[in-house]
Amino acid sequence: MNNVYNVIVDEFYIRDAQIIDTFGLSDEEFIALDFSSPMIDNLCHDIEPRHLIATVFASSEDEAVASVADKYRYDRRVLYAEKITF
């Protein structure tokens, strides 16, 4: 029986992930953001990303990882799968 899995890059293998914190900015401030300005650094903070590669049907976590690694040309050793339950 096939299950549904999300296949994700392990965060250990992702470096320097940041997000620009736009919480609290008005629409006008958001639109006016200048990404080349040094001031943008004040809005950035580190995050622990979850880089979803694909959602697949597979009979096991290993099969899900193997199929996604092959299809999208990722190294299997940096991926993991999470079973989705409904």
Image (cartoon, helix red, strand yellow):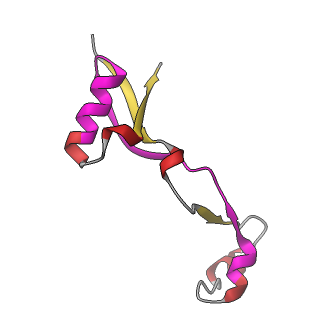
Q: Is residue 1 left or right of residue 39?
A: left
Who's the residue at 62% across and 87% down the image?
34
Who's the residue at 30% across and 28% down the image?
64
Q: How many marks?
A: 0
The image position of residue 40, as x and y in percent, is 68, 80
Which segment is the magenta one?
40-69
Residue 52 image-quadrant placement: top left
Q: Is residue 46 magenta?
A: yes
| Residue 57 seen in the figure | no
Who's the residue at 65% across and 83% down the image?
33
Who's the residue at 71% across and 80% down the image?
29
Q: Residue furthest top?
A: 1
Q: In this orientation, which residue lies closer to the viewer: 39 or 62?
A: 62
Q: Is residue 73 above or below residue 81?
A: below
Q: In this orientation, which residue lies closer to the viewer: 78 or 48?
A: 78
Q: Quadrant of the N terminus?
A: top left
| Residue 34 seen in the figure | yes
The image position of residue 70, as x and y in percent, is 21, 41
Q: Is residue 29 magenta?
A: no
